[in-house]
Amino acid sequence: MAWKAAFSRNLKELRILFCQTSPASAPTRSFVEKNYKELKTVNPKLPILIRECSGTEPQMWARYDLGVEKGIRLDGLTEQQISSVLEQLAKAGTGPKA
């Protein structure tokens, strides 16, 4: 879990989108409720944007240097899998710099 404290070095912004009521977004809502405080505490300067909109498919978007973005759909994933997606997104920004 040490990666959580370091992922703000690789990311410039994290956005999580989901529906407030749909069953497909339930694991994402639960993930946010359980993890937002810790993520924000260990990464206080990183913008973590939570966007709720009726009918929205659950998604996670990461923005890196130079405006590069990568998004992953979270539909059908468990909370543990969502955590793994976040870790993958954080590690995706650790490649060599030109």
Image (tube, rainbow, N blue to C red):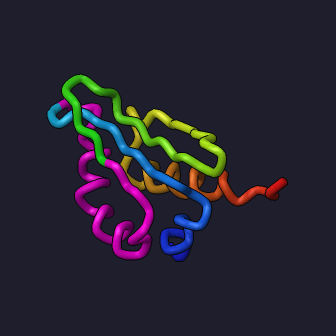
Percent position of residue 16, x then y: 37, 44
* 94 relative to 88 in the view: left or right: right
Percent position of residue 82, x then y: 43, 49
Percent position of residue 18, x then y: 29, 36
Residue closer to the observer: 9 or 32? 9
Res. 27 image quadrant:
top left
Question: Which residue is painted at 19% across and 26% down in the image?
Answer: 54
Q: Furthest-front residue in view?
A: 66
Percent position of residue 53, x then y: 22, 31
**Residue stretch in magenta:** 22-49
Question: Which residue is painted at 70% across and 60% down in the image?
Answer: 94
Give the overall secondary structure of the magenta segment.
helix
Establish if 70 lies above or below 84: above
Establish if 39 lies above or below 50: below
Question: Which residue is painted at 52% across and 46% down in the image?
Answer: 62
* 22 relative to 89 in the view: left or right: left
Indicate whether residue 60 is drawn in magenta. Answer: no
Indicate whether residue 45 is drawn in magenta. Answer: yes
Res. 75 image quadrant:
top left
Q: Furthest-right residue in view?
A: 98
* 85 relative to 38 in the view: left or right: right
Question: Which residue is painted at 57% across and 50% down in the image?
Answer: 89
Q: Furthest-left residue in view?
A: 21
